[in-house]
Image (cartoon, rainbow, N blue to C red):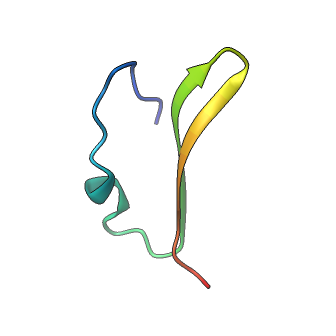
């Protein structure tokens, strides 16, 4: 899921139903990727 620039992301909605791991690329800046990661396992 690549999110367009200046889009508000509802983190609570994105994390619902995730039982172990999810990695979401949020934005691309030059050669870098900003990601939202959800990790629920110990």
Residue at 45% of width from left, 75% of height from top? Answer: 19
The residue most toward the bottom is 42
Q: Residue furthest top?
A: 30
Q: Establish if 15 lies above or below 35.
A: below
- Residue, x 69% and y 26% (percent of image)? 32
Can you give x and y, in whole percent of width and height, for residue 22 in the image?
52, 58
Query: Where residue 25 sits in the image (x, y, percent)?
Result: 54, 37
The residue drawn where x is 28% and y is 59% is 12
Image quadrant where residue 16 sits: bottom left
Nearer to us in this view, 20 or 27: 27
* Residue 16 versus residue 28 in the image, above or below: below
Picture coordinates of residue 24, whole percent (x, y)? 51, 45
| Figure quadrant of residue 7 | top left
Total labels: the figure holds 0
Task: Left or right? Give the position of 12 relative to 18.
Answer: left
Residue 20 horizontal/vertical position (percent): 53, 74
- 28 sits left or right of 7 in the view: right
The C terminus lies in quadrant: bottom right
Image point (36%, 61%), residue name = 15
């Amino acid at each position: 899921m690549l999110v367009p620039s200046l889009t508000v992301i509802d983190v609570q909605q994105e994390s619902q139903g995730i039982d172990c791991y999810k990695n979401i690329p949020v934005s691309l800046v030059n050669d870098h990727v900003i990601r939202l990661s959800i990790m629920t396992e110990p």
